[in-house]
Amino acid sequence: MDIVNTGKKLHQALNVTNVAEGLAPLLIRLYLAPVLIQAGWNKANSFDSVVQWFGNSEWGLGMPFPELMAFLAIAAELVGGVLILVGLATRWASIPLMITMVVAAVTVHWQNGWPAIADASSWLADGTILHNEQVMQAQEKLAMAKDILQEYGNYDWLTSSGNFVILNNGIEFAATYFIMLLSLFFTGGGRFTSVDYYLCRWLCR
């Protein structure tokens, strides 16, 4: 019984933190919203190229109605990103964004496996369902590229902002953003930290 009572007391102690339960959704929103807004802004600034990429079946995605699909993707990321940033209609805004992430993962990233950055030493790239041979070959290619740069270029200056990597463009980021959006769908914008919270209080009153 002492163990049970101790467990209850610990649980009650943890419940004190519920007053700050809106902090976690707030941090997710502040992390995620700039990523979404930037993605939508980039698409909007290169709308014609995005439409061509969406519609072309040879080197693009081969989607039907590419103009409409591009517009919906931009609207979801730009408008949805702003709504999530301020915490307004958070749960509703997360729905089209989750759909966008699923479409991106399936049509763009799936064939590249899981890792966003090619790392042959990662267990996520070797022997998994999303195994991809190009990830396994990346280490050799990266080493050769570094050798060439060290011999013919100013390698110290070229790497002064960070090490070179090979972009694998796997589903890692799309899946991560989907999970964050799914969390916001269930939690909402957050207690005390979102417009939704105060709007709901006003409407209920």
Image (tube, rainbow, N blue to C red):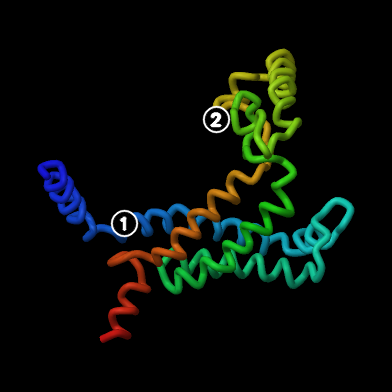
Examine the image and state in which quarter residue 147 appears. Answer: top right
Residue at (82, 68) in percent of width and height: 64
| Amino acid at pointer 1 | Leu
Q: Is mark 2 on a helix, strand or loop?
A: loop
Percent position of residue 122, x then y: 59, 28
Residue at (61, 61) in percent of width and height: 40
The residue nearer to you, when weighing 7 against 84, is: 7
Q: In which quarter of the image is the N terminus?
A: top left
Q: Residue 161 carries which label?
A: 2
As drawn, 135 above or below 197: above
Residue at (60, 51) in percent of width and height: 174
Q: Residue furthest front?
A: 1
Question: How many numbered circles are shown?
Answer: 2
Which of the two marks, 1 or 2, is nearer to us in this view?
Answer: 1
Q: Name the residue under label 1.
A: 23
Q: Which residue lies furthest to the top in this view?
A: 151
* Structural distance between the alpha carbons of marks 1 and 2: 33 Å
- Of the numbered discs 1 and 2, the one sitting upstream in the chain is 1
Residue at (32, 72) in percent of width and height: 197
Percent position of residue 164, x then y: 63, 27
Callout 1 environment at 10 Å: few (<14), some (14 to 19), or many (20+)? some
Examine the image and state in which quarter residue 139 appears. Answer: top right
Q: In this view, does 48 lie to the left or right of 32?
A: right
Q: Is mark 1 on a helix, strand or loop?
A: helix
Q: Residue furthest right?
A: 58
Percent position of residue 105, x then y: 67, 52
Q: Residue 122 carries which label?
A: none
As drawn, 139 above or below 81: above
Q: In which quarter of the image is the C terminus?
A: bottom left
| Amino acid at pointer 2 | Ser
Percent position of residue 17, x then y: 21, 54
